[in-house]
Image (spheres, rainbow, N blue to C red):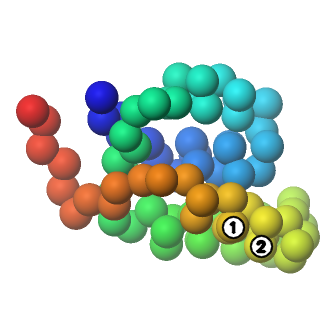
Amino acid sequence: MKIIADTNTFLAVALDEPEKSEIISLTGGHKLIAPAILPFEIGNALSAMLKRRKINSDEVLSAWDAVRAIPVELALTYERH
């Protein structure tokens, strides 16, 4: 089954938020799909968190690496089947 995931989903996993385990459990074994703009949205969110001093530069790099390790299909549009 395909699951559409948004920026918050990826950030929650990459930043070890409390809902990380549940997200992984619910999406495991399924194909993730996200809008093609996802990497830009994640970069923007991480940059904003860094500027607000919610995370440091090492955490930004670690989160970016974690997000890149998540298999996801980036789509320009999504059609229901």
Q: In this view, does 68 lie to the left or right of 3?
A: right
Label 1 sits on residue = 65
Q: What residue is rendered at 40% in x and 33% in y?
A: 30
Position of residue 49 measured from the top left corner of the image (x, y, whole percent): 77, 64
For numbered disc 1, what is the local secondary structure? helix
- Quadrant in which residue 23 is drawn: top right
Q: Name the residue under label 2.
A: 61
Q: Do the residues labelled 2 and 1 touch (CB within 8 Å)?
A: yes
Q: Residue at x 12, y 44 (%)?
A: 79
State the residue lying farthest toward the front: 29
From the viewer's side, name the closer residue of 63 and 53.
63
| Label 2 crowd bin: few (<14), some (14–19), many (20+), radius 10 Å | few
Residue 74, quarter of picture:
bottom left
Residue 52 visible in the snapshot: no
Q: Is residue 60 above or below residue 75?
A: below
Of the residues shown, which amino acid type is indicated by label 1? Answer: Asp
Q: In which quarter of the image is the C terminus?
A: top left
Q: Between marks 2 and 1, how big is the CA–CA gap?
A: 6 Å
**Whole-percent x and y of residue 3?**
36, 35
Residue 29 drawn at (x, y percent):
45, 30
- Is residue 68 or residue 10 the one in the foreground? 68
What kind of residue is marked 2?
Leu
- In this rendering, is residue 29 above or below 74? above
Q: Which mark is residue 34?
A: none
Is 29 left or right of 24, judged from the image as shown? Answer: left
Left or right of 73? Residue 41 is: right
Q: Is residue 61 above or below residue 75?
A: below
Q: Is residue 26 above or below residue 61?
A: above
Q: What element carries label 2?
A: helix
Q: Which of 9 and 2 is in front in this view?
A: 2
Camera sees residue 75: yes
